[in-house]
């Protein structure tokens, strides 16, 4: 099914800004505390929530890949087997990040440079213990997003104005989440990728503890 594009047609060609994630931007009601790192999720999606198709991303937005690198570098990243295998072998493990893979079928010997866990909670706990810079990032796929959404403190979401088919969707954000920052700030403006795709970056933060 093709996604429906967003209504705005105004674009911005200004250089995208890195969304600051310092602790003073986090709501005091977030479950994050000084005693443990913040748990973040990061993904790119279309207006209808598509995040992937057949194990890959059905678009080419190099600026979003750079954004992903800026946000996650220096922090543990937790992912499922399909996400791990979606990266070209020459880029595995993701550099300057503690790569943690959750899988019941992946042979640890086939995941050189990564730590493989069969238990999701154990994987996340290991990531939290290894975090030295205050953040842990869940980077996919959809199963992990859904399973760990209740433990997340913040979400870096890239919106893409593109019509694509896909078989994987992002989790929906309920009233526990609110948009705290956006780039561009004007919701009717978009950055234009050199590949021709319009995009914008959003930071969502939890306002209430889940459950």
Image (tube, rainbow, N blue to C red):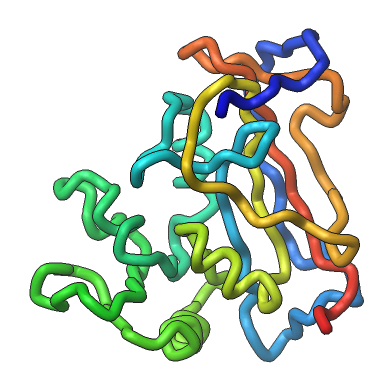
At which x and y percent is residue 192? Answer: 61, 14
Q: 153 above or below 45?
A: below
Residue sitting at 65 percent across and 51 percent down?
156
Residue 166 or residue 123, whichever sits in front: 166
Q: 192 above or below 62?
A: above
At which x and y percent is residue 201? Answer: 68, 37
Q: Residue furthest left?
A: 109
Residue sitting at 89 percent across and 68 percent down?
207
- In the rendered structure, the answer to whether residue 100 lies left or right of residue 154 reads left
Residue 78 appears anywhere in the view: yes
**Quarter where residue 172 is shown:** bottom right
Residue 65 or residue 14, whichever sits in front: 65
Q: 126 above or below 7?
A: below
**Quarter where residue 159 is shown:** top right
Residue sitting at 45 percent across and 83 percent down?
120
At which x and y percent is residue 65? Answer: 45, 37
**Quarter where residue 149 is shown:** bottom right
- In the rendered structure, the answer to whether residue 43 lies left or right of residue 203 reads left
At which x and y percent is residue 157? Answer: 65, 46
Viewport quadrant of the C terminus: bottom right
Viewport quadrant of the N terminus: top right
Residue sitting at 42 percent across and 24 percent down?
60
Q: 105 above or below 22?
A: below
Residue 17 appears anywhere in the view: no
């Amino acid at each position: 099914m093709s996604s429906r594009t967003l209504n705005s047609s105004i674009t911005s060609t200004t250089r995208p800004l890195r969304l600051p994630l310092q602790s003073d931007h986090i709501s005091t009601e977030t479950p994050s505390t000084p005693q443990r790192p913040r748990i973040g999720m990061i993904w790119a999606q279309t207006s209808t929530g598509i995040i992937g198709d057949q194990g890959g991303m059905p678009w080419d937005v190099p600026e979003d890949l750079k954004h992903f690198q800026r946000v996650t570098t220096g922090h543990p990243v937790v992912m499922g087997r399909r996400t791990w295998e979606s990266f070209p072998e020459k880029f595995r493990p993701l550099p300057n990040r503690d790569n943690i893979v959750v899988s019941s079928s992946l042979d640890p010997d086939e995941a050189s440079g990564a730590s493989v866990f069969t238990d999701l909670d154990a994987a996340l706990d290991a990531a939290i213990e290894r975090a030295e810079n205050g953040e842990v990032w869940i980077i996919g796929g959809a199963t992990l997003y859904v399973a760990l959404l209740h433990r997340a403190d913040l979400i870096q979401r890239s919106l893409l104005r593109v019509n694509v088919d896909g078989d994987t969707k992002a989790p929906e954000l309920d009233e526990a989440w609110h948009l705290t920052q956006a780039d561009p700030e004007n919701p009717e403006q978009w950055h234009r990728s050199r590949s021709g795709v319009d995009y914008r970056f959003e930071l969502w933060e939890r306002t209430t503890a889940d459950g």
